[in-house]
């Protein structure tokens, strides 16, 4: 399933990247990031994200599902996830 999702996304992104003014199927503009630089902030953030994901073993969206299934331990992950969002915004 993941390979099919990646293939669909890859084909769609290739089409969008090669358009002058990319738009969605509904005609809304698509704003692609202009910054392609790999800097220290990106590397440090990626390492922190990877370590957290590896330790917790939880992806962000399924963490909310885990709460509904009664895995209260996911609360710690969700708190850390939102703390990371707040730190990023500052």
Image (tube, rainbow, N blue to C red):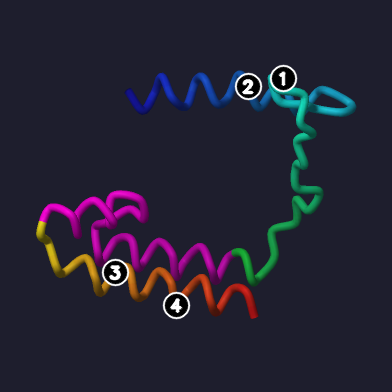
Q: Nearer the viewer, mark 1 or mark 3?
A: 3
Task: Estimate the x, y position of residue 9 in percent, counting from the top left.
Answer: 55, 26
Q: Quadrant of residue 23?
A: top right
**Above-or-below relation of 62 to 75:** above
Q: Which residue is mark 2?
A: 12
Q: Residues within 10 Å of mark 2 (few under 14, many from 20)?
A: few
Q: Which residue is mark 3?
A: 77
Query: In terms of secondary structure, where does tag 4 sit?
Result: helix
Magenta residue span: 43-69
Q: Nearer the viewer, mark 2 or mark 4?
A: 4
Instruction: Please tell me which residue lies in front, 42 or 61.
Output: 61
Q: Which residue is mark 4?
A: 83
Label 2 or label 3, whichever comes before in sequence order: 2
Query: In terms of secondary structure, where does tag 2 sit?
Result: helix
**Above-or-below relation of 30 to 44:** above
Q: Which residue is mark 1?
A: 15
């Amino acid at each position: 399933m993941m390979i099919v999702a990646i293939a669909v996304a890859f084909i769609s992104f290739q089409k969008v990247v090669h358009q002058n003014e990319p738009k969605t199927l509904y005609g809304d503009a698509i704003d692609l990031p202009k910054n392609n630089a790999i800097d220290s902030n990106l590397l440090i953030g990626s390492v922190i994200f990877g370590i957290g994901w590896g330790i917790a073993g939880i992806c962000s969206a399924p963490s909310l599902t885990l709460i509904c299934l009664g895995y209260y331990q996911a609360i710690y992950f969700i708190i850390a996830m939102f703390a990371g969002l707040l730190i990023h915004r500052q």
